[in-house]
Amino acid sequence: MEKWFVAAKRADFAAWSKKFHISPVTARIIRNRDIFSEEEVEKYISGTFLDMYPPELMVDMEEAAVIIEGKIRKREKLRVIGDYDVDGIMAAHILTKGLQALSADVDTVIPHRVKDGYGLNEQLIEDAFTEGIRTIITCDNGIAAAKQIALAVSKDMTVVVTDHHEVPYREENGQRTELLPAAAAVVDPKREDCTYPYKNICGAVVAYKLAALLFRRAGLEPAKKQALLDEFLQLSAVATVCDVMELLDENRIIVKEGLKRLQSKPCEGMRALMEVNGIESRKLSAYHLGFVLGPCLNATGRLDTAARALSLLSAKDRRSAMQAAEELKEMNDSRKLMTLDGLEKAVAYIEENHLEQEKVLVVYLSDCHESLAGIVAGRLREKYGKPVFVLTNAEEGVKGSGRSVEGYDMYAAMTECRELFTKFGGHKMAAGLSMRKEDVSLLRKRLNEGCRLTEEDFINKVHIDVPMPLVHADRKLAEELQILEPFGTANPKPLFACREVHFQAGRKMGAKENFARYKVEEDGRQYEVVYFGGLEKFHAFLCEKFGDGADAALYAGGCDYCISITYQLGINSYMGRSEVQILMQHFC
């Protein structure tokens, strides 16, 4: 079931149109992205590297820099501990390479997903201590590792935390108290006392900011500094998209500027990864980062060790980069097959246990590879439109990942039953956890009892930017809409809607005939509409609305089915030719 909503946010669109040389339609779309003032419009359209926020605006950032500088001067050994997803890998590489540029004695450890789990654990602290390391710098983790950091402090070790996840808290009498770890510096924009202007950055961006501040304070040679920051911005862009950060404010600038650098002068590792996936660098988009390159980088941390991804990023020549890239692609191909198997078993589990009606789905798959739990949870969320936790057997108890929906704060919900977990962390839309196997049923019960979502919340909401007849869907507008890129979370491709479109004929396309082109008419004019959304769904709709066999009749031609549609507008380039393309998204 769907509900269509037309955005009705107000602004002086005529004034914006005149000042920024854009159409009123584009002005309305920008306002729909929660852009309020003319200054924000200017930044949204024309923001550059120079509009990024200074690192020292983040609480404890300068303190972290001072601590690290002191350690480098004393030639003390430093250890960077990251995470095994794209964000954690990129953050670890950025910090390590940045510190090496400052002549630091530094190495990198990425926790093993199965052996170590997420973030810091006691064994990682013990290992570092045994190896003579007295300073640990975390990235993309650490904010929830109070116990582990307390252990390090008890051994006279110094810990600097750089993270971006939600800060753990205790709630009593309606008052929240943050539970910060006892680190020497805790850099996390989500801290209540952090006044950084934009808090929704990823771990790699926090690492980038720290590296930039260290370079400036050290007076690093300008050309070397710029080359490193250009590379780090590329990797920060990849991490921002892959960690599903909102592509607004500073994140929009990071991804836009990072893509420019990836298109013009990618680092050796990313160039190789693009090549093995058949991506021309000049055509690279945010889509490729999130759905092609990112999964390859993620696969190594899921099925093996993230060290493979680090070796790709560290490659200094084409040969070693290509070898690493090919290994990552092969691993991702295997991961895809395993994911399909896990998804089929998860759907069967839900049906066999009659869980479809529950508000929060807690799915226990004993033999699912624990590294795939998050992907399977995401697929189930798309299928059922509900918050999902996928749990699987681990060395001690069970581990799992959750993926949420709009309106459900997954981290807050978990905090309400925190005693059931041996370890947990995350944010509103995603989380990870460890717990005892015998508490799985109780977790399902507690989460559903505490869930405040209503039936209305589970109806798929289609947010339409502008109701617009097809006559206005022309090349001029399609080209103008490109200034809104990069598209992604919180900055989706514009969605238009049109009533009473007459579908008259169609032809299936593709080797598997899994998409189609339709000849349609509106107000006496002919247009072509393309649909990639799954023909089975559209065919079922046609037969329900117009009678059995309506789908076959449409492909035979000579029909007149009056349908309301939503659509996106783009330009399709193929074999040196380009054409305006109207892409149907929804129908009723």
Image: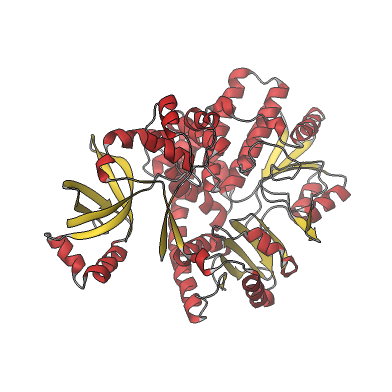
Q: How is the image coloured?
A: secondary structure
Where residue 199 sits in the image (x, y, percent)?
A: 65, 42
Nearest the eye: 484 or 119: 484
Residue 467 horizontal side relative to residue 373, left or right: left
Residue 251 horizontal side relative to residue 520, left or right: right
Vertical placement of residue 438 versus 312, above or below: below
Residue 352 horizontal side relative to residue 74, left or right: left
Where residue 443 sits in the image (x, y, percent)?
A: 66, 72
Where residue 518 sits in the image (x, y, percent)?
A: 20, 54
Vertical placement of residue 445 versus 468, above or below: below
Residue 488 horizontal side relative to residue 561, left or right: right
The answer to whether any part of residue 507 appears in the image is no
Looking at the image, how many numbered discs can be counted on the residues?
A: 0
Quadrant occupied by the N terminus: bottom left
Vertical placement of residue 228 versus 300, above or below: above
Residue drawn at x 16%, y 61% is: 555
- Displayed quadrant of residue 368: bottom right
Residue drawn at x 44%, y 46% is: 492
The answer to whether any part of residue 11 appears in the image is yes
- Displayed quadrant of residue 221: top right
Residue drawn at x 38%, y 40% is: 279
Where residue 531 sits in the image (x, y, percent)?
A: 28, 54
Quadrant occupied by the C terminus: bottom left
